[in-house]
Image: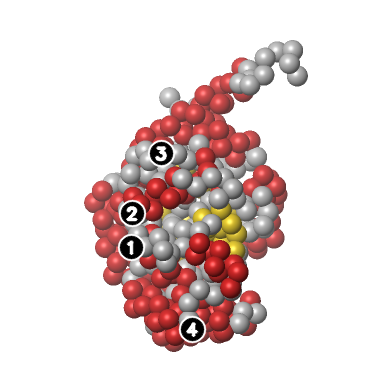
Amino acid sequence: MTHPALHTAACDLFGVQYPIVQTGMGWVAGARLTSATSAAGGLGILASATMTFEQLTEAVHEVRERTDRPFGVNLRADQDDISERIELLIRERVRVASFAQAPGERLVKQLRDAGVATMPTVGAPRHAEKVAAWGVDALIAQGAEGGGHTGTIPTSLLLPQVVDSVDVPVLAAGGFTDGRGLTAALAWGAAGVAMGTRFLLTKESTVPNTVKDVYLGTAVTGTVVTKRIDGYPQRVIRTDVVDHLEHSGRMTSLPRALRNALGFRKLTGTSLRALVREGLAMKRKEGLTWSQVAMAANAPMLTKATMVDGRLETGILPTGQGVGAIDELPTVAELVARIVDEAEQTLTRLEKGTGTGMDKGEA
C-alpha cells in the first residue's frame, strides 16, 4: 500500500496513482512516452507545440489505444489553431491542459467549464498569483535548475513562495530526479513533482541513443543558461555550438535562419502570418534585434535537429541541471516504481527519526 503522504491533491485532480508528472517536452513527449508514464501511474503530457493539428489528433488517439489512464496535452496559447486544439481536448476528454506560457483567462474558463484541468508553468510568485486569479486548477513552479526556458529563482526558494501565494495544487519542477526529491518537494508544500530530463532519459523516449549518451555523460556543471538561442533564458547542455553562440551572438546567417523558421512553420502548420506576428511581438516586448528574432524563429529547428534527427553538430540540447545525477536508462515503469519506493523509504526514515550519514553523537 502506498504511503498516505504520496496521495496528494494532484492525484485526485489528475486521476492518477502517484503525484509524478512527465512534462510536455517539444520533439520528445510523444504518444509512446506519454502513454508509458500514465500507464505507470503518473501523468504523461503530450507536447503539441511541435505538432500539426492532425499529428496531435493522431497522438491523442494513439495514447488512448495504449492506455486507459488519464493524460494531458501541453499547448501554446498563441498558436493560430488554438481554438481547434482546445475543442479537440474537450471532445476527447483529455484530463489536463498544460501551458508553458500564461493561457489567458478566456481559455482557462473554456477548459474548466468543459472539465479539463488547466496547469500553467510559472517562475515567480507574482505570475502564480496572476494565473490563480483566472481560475487555473494547478500550477507547475519551475525553479532555475529546470531545463529549457527557465527563470532565475532556485527551486528551493521559489516553491515555498508559490505554495504560500495560491490555493491550488502546485507541482515542483527543476532539479528533481528521484524519490528523495519528491519527498523534499512534499516537505516544501508541493503536491508532487514534474520532471522532463529524467523522463527524456528512459527507454520509451524516442530521442536517438547517440543523443541520450551525451546527456548521460553530462555533469551537474555541464549545463549553461543562455539567451543566445532565442532571446529567452534557456538551460541547455554546454556544447561547442552553444559556446559559439555565446561568443559570437549568432550561429547562422539570417537567410539560413529564416529558411529554418519556414521549415518549422511547414512542420507544425503555423501560418506565415502567425510567424511574422510572433516575430514582431518578440521584437517589441523583449527588445530583440532582428538577428535575435531570426534566431528565435530558428531555435525549434535547431532543437529538432538534435532531439529527432540526432545531428549533434548542429543541434541544441535542452536539459535540467539534474542531468548530472542521471547515469542510466530505465523503462518508465521502472523509473516511476523506483521513485515511489525511494520516497516511501525516505518518509519512513523521517518518521522513525533515523539518519543516513551521521551516527548519534556525531552532530
Task: Please give the residue where the numbered disc 1 appears in the rendered image.
Answer: 309
State which quadrant residue 249 falls in. bottom right
Identify residue type, mark 1: Asp
Query: N-terminal of the two: label 2 or label 1?
Result: 2
* Image-based side of 114 in relation to 176, left or right: left
Tell me whether the residue at label 3 lies in contact with that at label 4, contact meaning CB atoms closer than 8 angstroms: no
Spatial CA distance of label 4 from label 1 is: 22 Å
- Front residue of this view, candidates 96 and 158: 158
Q: Residue at x 33, y 44 (%)?
A: 203
Identify residue type, mark 3: Glu
Considering only vertical position in the picture, is 172 above or below 300?
above
Spatial CA distance of label 3 from label 4 is: 39 Å
In what element is the residue under mark 2? Answer: loop
Is residue 121 in view? no
Picture coordinates of residue 266, whole percent (x, y): 34, 78
Query: N-terminal of the two: label 3 or label 4?
Result: 4
Task: Please give the residue where the numbered disc 2 appears in the rendered image.
Answer: 208
Query: N-terminal of the two: label 3 or label 1?
Result: 1
Is residue 249 in view? yes
- Front residue of this view, candidates 330 and 115: 330
* Image-based side of 35 in relation to 26, left or right: left
Spatial CA distance of label 3 from label 1 is: 22 Å
Spatial CA distance of label 3 from label 2 is: 15 Å
Considering only vertical position in the picture, is 358 above or below 15?
above
In what element is the residue under mark 3? Answer: loop
Q: Residue at x 48, y 77 (%)?
A: 252
Picture coordinates of residue 222, whole percent (x, y): 55, 50
Task: Please give the residue where the numbered disc 4 appears in the rendered image.
Answer: 254
Identify residue type, mark 2: Pro
Spatial CA distance of label 2 from label 1 is: 8 Å
Spatial CA distance of label 2 from label 4 is: 29 Å
Task: Please give the residue where the numbered disc 3 appears in the rendered image.
Answer: 328
